Image (spheres, rainbow, N blue to C red):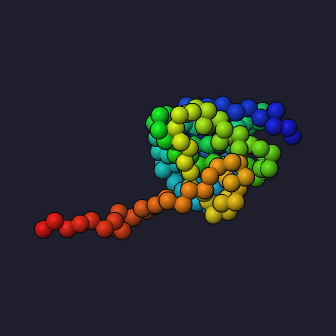
Amino acid sequence: MSLSEVVFQRELTLNADEFIDVLKRSTLAQRRPVDDAERIQNMLQNANLIVTARINGKLVGVSRALTDFAFCTYLSDLAVDEAYQKMGIGVRLIAETKKQSPKAKLILLAAPAAVNYYPKTGMTNFTQCFLLDNIDDLKLKNND
């Protein structure tokens, strides 16, 4: 299989079942709500930049991002079918995503298993990232 056989393109919509299928064929399903079709549909509906990799129409990779196209692009999901990994599809999805918003910084949170992958692509490790998962963890100042 050659990278030249892969069609990379921006898609305005993506079917939830197709997205779930490629998540399961990658390692990303372990960290995504693949058993909650409504939530997956909302994830796709509210993403404003989806780039796909297809071979003969079959989805083998996807980049799902949120961007303002001017300052920042958050690459939320980068998934490549395990059968097609190590062919350059992932880095090409990153490149195609960046081309769609060239002025914006591309930002992502690496999955633990992928931490060593991103430096190989030329991306810079940035340690000043913060995460809030539960609103109750936020320390609000009480102004009584």
Which residue is drawn at the image coordinates 34% and 65% (left, top)? 138
Question: Where residue 87 appears, x then y in whole percent?
Answer: 80, 45
Q: Can you name the residue that lies furthest to the right here?
A: 1
Q: Nearer the viewer, residue 61 or 76?
A: 76
60 and 78: which is toward the camera? 78
Q: Is residue 93 above or below residue 141?
A: above
Q: Is residue 69 depicted above or below 33 in this figure?
A: above
Tell me if residue 68 can be seen. yes
Q: Position of residue 5 (x, y in %)?
A: 81, 33
Return the residue found at the far left: 144
Quarter that holds the C terminus: bottom left
Q: Nearer the viewer, residue 105 or 109?
A: 105
Residue 129 at what x, y percent from top left? 49, 58
Q: Is residue 118 left or right of residue 108?
A: right
Q: Position of residue 93 (x, y in %)?
A: 67, 40
Q: How many marks?
A: 0
* 124 left or right of 104 in image: right
Residue at 52%, 46% in the rendered image: 74
In this picture, residue 131 sits left or right of residue 88: left
Identified at 62% across, 43% down, the residue is: 63
Quadrant that contains the N terminus: top right
Q: Is residue 48 visible to the viewer in this orientation of the structure?
A: no
